[in-house]
Image (cartoon, rainbow, N blue to C red):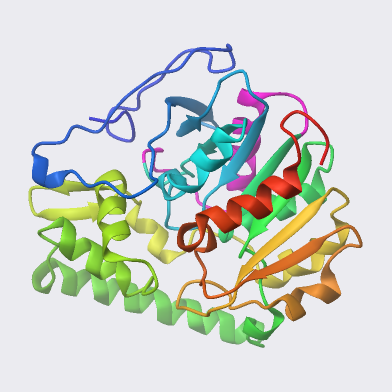
């Protein structure tokens, strides 16, 4: 079993270069194995401890190559980069990603908020290098890394935000007293859902069924990809399959955060900055267009809209996304 919440596995000093704790998820039968064209599991795995939480860290590429860090989106995990990350690794980068707290193989936490995710990211950064590093973030990960770049420009050398820039059009004008009511309604609804779930619902019994449920939120992603995602990011319990996500995140894991905070901080970013957007709207994502972000981008930034893809640009069009990113990053170890 993977080291994680149940076993609270620890491995000494992760900053010691070259030390990796390697694990693999046991597969009980060939029926639970899936592959996907171009997908490659990480070359190394290790753990980083931050504020009492053990994070799962995953790496592709030569350990001695210049690093680039990848931050995944909400309700996802590092495995969503299994096609995209190898393209960067094959271009000469040491690609490092991590499962955010409560996601994937990282431990569940008593606290989920924006600032905690920022602290976790810095702990992973420190485990790789004390020097400024290029970072890439998708969705929530893109917003997190944008805030980090604006707040600590000396820690990040270059930034790529993949469909993680909020659109001003998607921010409802809700008064504070209405927000309190919405929170109460959401909480009551969640409690009702939990009561119904105890008697009326069941977990998906097969890989295919869990993948089909995910497709309701990601209708543009293929069944083949979603089944692969299940085999690397879900687990099979006695009563069925479930994603390795802390269920309490259903009540929100953003803490005190509003989308406009990320949008209005974009002008403060002083490093090389690339925004990659998909052209097609879908249930997940902001539906942001290049015209929405141009007024907020700093002078050195660039925004590109990839045609015929949705929120998961790097999954639908990994080669095109990697080409844009590699052009932005420049030669590994050099300056962009």
- The percent coordinates of residue 53 (x first, y second) are 47, 34
Q: Is residue 216 above or below residue 333?
A: below
Q: Quadrant of residue 124?
A: top right
- The percent coordinates of residue 91 (x first, y second) are 61, 35
Q: Nearer the viewer, residue 22 or 9?
A: 22
Q: Quadrant of residue 130?
A: top right
Magenta segment includes 116: yes
Q: Is residue 125 above or below residue 181?
A: above
Q: Quadrant of the N terminus?
A: top left
Q: Residue at x 77, y 26 (%)?
A: 131
Q: Nearer the viewer, residue 331 or 97?
A: 331
Tag count? 0
In the image, 107: left or right of 29? right
Q: Residue at x 66, y 87 (%)?
A: 175
- The percent coordinates of residue 9 (x first, y second) are 35, 23
Q: Is residue 53 visible?
A: no
Q: Which residues are magenta?
A: 105-132
In the image, 296: left or right of 115? right
- The percent coordinates of residue 55 (x first, y second) are 47, 34
Q: Nearer the viewer, residue 177 or 87?
A: 87
Q: Is residue 52 visible?
A: yes
Q: Quadrant of the C terminus?
A: top right
Q: Residue at x 43, y 44 (%)?
A: 82
């Amino acid at each position: 079993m993977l080291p994680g919440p149940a076993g609270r596995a620890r491995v000494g000093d992760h900053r010691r270069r070259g030390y990796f704790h390697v694990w693999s998820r046991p597969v009980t039968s060939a029926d639970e194995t899936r592959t996907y064209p171009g997908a490659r599991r990480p070359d190394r795995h290790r753990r980083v401890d931050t504020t009492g939480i053990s994070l799962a860290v995953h790496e592709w590429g030569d350990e001695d190559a210049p690093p680039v860090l990848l931050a995944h989106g909400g309700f996802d995990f590092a495995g969503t980069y299994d096609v995209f990350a190898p393209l960067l690794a094959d271009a000469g980068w040491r690609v490092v990603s991590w499962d955010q707290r409560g996601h994937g193989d990282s431990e569940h936490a008593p606290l989920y908020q924006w600032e905690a995710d920022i602290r976790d990211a810095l702990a992973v950064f420190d485990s790789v290098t004390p020097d400024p590093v290029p970072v890439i973030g998708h969705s929530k990960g893109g917003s997190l890394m944008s805030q980090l770049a604006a707040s600590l420009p000396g820690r990040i050398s270059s930034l790529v935000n993949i469909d993680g820039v909020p659109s001003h059009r998607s921010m409802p004008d809700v008064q504070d007293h209405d927000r309190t009511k919405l929170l109460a309604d959401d909480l009551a609804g969640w409690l009702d859902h939990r009561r119904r779930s105890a008697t009326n619902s069941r977990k998906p019994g097969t890989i295919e069924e869990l993948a089909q449920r995910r497709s309701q939120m990601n209708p543009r992603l293929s069944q083949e990809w979603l089944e692969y995602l299940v085999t690397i990011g879900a687990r099979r319990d006695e009563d069925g399959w479930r994603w390795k996500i802390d269920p309490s995140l259903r009540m929100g894991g953003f803490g005190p955060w509003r989308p406009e905070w990320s949008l209005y901080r974009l002008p403060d970013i002083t490093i090389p900055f690339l925004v990659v957007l998909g052209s097609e709207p879908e249930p997940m994502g902001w539906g942001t267009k290049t015209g929405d972000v141009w007024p907020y981008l700093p002078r050195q930034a660039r925004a590109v809209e990839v045609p015929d893809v949705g929120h998961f640009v790097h999954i639908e069009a990994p080669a095109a996304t990697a080409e844009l990113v590699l052009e932005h990053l420049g030669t590994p170890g050099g300056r962009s």
